[in-house]
Amino acid sequence: MTFGDHTLPLAADTLRTWALDESLKANVMANPVLASAAGRIARRFMAGETTTDALTLIAKNAHRGHLTSIECAGESVRSEEIANKETGIFTTLIAEMKTRDELATVSFDLSHIGSVVSPVLGLTNALAIAEAARDAGTYIMISAESSERTDLVLDLYEKVSDAFEETGITIQARLHRSPADLQRVMQRPGPIRLVKGAFLENSTVAHPRESNELTDAYLAMAQTLVTDGHRVNLATHDSSMVESLKSRLGQKLKGAHVEFEMLQGLGTELLDSLSNEGYATREYVLFGSEWWLYVLNRMAEHPERVITALADLNQAADFGNGK
């Protein structure tokens, strides 16, 4: 099967539009048949619904040579009650990790824990999670959100970092503003996760997906972080990008401050290969029932995954609302 030059980018933009359509999400999840189908597709990219499902992967990842980062799926919560409840899921997760003596970093969107309701609520809940993480011997990593929330995310990150300097932040290489943002966050000691950026953005704020400009921006920011000695998670599943990083930075990538990070279900063989070559590696594990945005963005990164999703619908695995 062949596609025209614009077919896959248009398909990706459609998936990203669906990812942000809260009405579509609500309609799908309210329909048992559609929810079952969507759940089967999500299972490829998710550990499962519960903290136990996620924690089980820590030991498995360690056996493969990888560290783990865990997130409970969710974003754009618009209720204080729900935001507080979701915060409790994160603190419970951390307590269970401490009990089991199996630690991972903990990632989340600030909008998942109340920043859209109010910045004060988002900050209060982020501080509670950061405190629980420190008590357990680990730290939090704040995720990137769409460009209209970047100022809010960075402002709240700095406030959390004032109290918990180990806190990490995610920077999207795709945004035109990111080189300046990178200099801003490098003033703090916490790790920086460098990603390409998966959100639907227009050309006034972001480089086109799969463009030379995006590749150049990612490589330039990676070089800045690695050569500066700042802690960095190079988050990419792009094998050509990995090879470019190796060519440009060589043995510096094996420094104690550098990790390669990839999402569960994506880049598995590449991550294993990097670990075998002596690089520090981390797998990003997601659990929970609010996976809509995450899964659609993963499919949007490579729209060919829609074919894989159709194949997954033929499997009998249960997940989420599906039976």
Image (cartoon, rainbow, N blue to C red):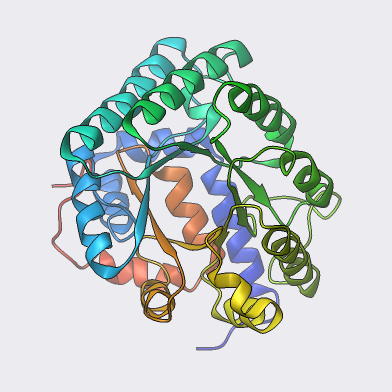
Q: Quadrant of residue 89?
A: top left
Decide: is 24 above or below 250. above
**Residue located at (44% from left, 70% from top):** 305
Decide: is 112 above or below 314. above
| Front residue (pair 39, 298) | 298
| Front residue (pair 92, 34) | 92
Does any portion of residue 45 appear in the rendered image?
Answer: yes
| Front residue (pair 241, 162) | 162
Q: Quadrant of residue 233?
A: bottom right
Q: Position of residue 320 (x, y in %)?
A: 23, 43
**Residue located at (54% from left, 12% from top):** 121
Count the labels in the image: 0
Q: Position of residue 113 (x, y in %)?
A: 47, 23
| Front residue (pair 77, 60) | 60
Q: Position of residue 68 (x, y in %)?
A: 35, 53
**Residue located at (65% from left, 65% from top):** 10
Q: Quadrant of residue 284?
A: bottom left
Q: Position of residue 75 (x, y in %)?
A: 49, 33
Outermost residue to the bottom: 1
73 horizontally vs 165: left or right: left
Does any portion of residue 50 appear in the rendered image?
Answer: no
Decide: is 269 above or below 123. below
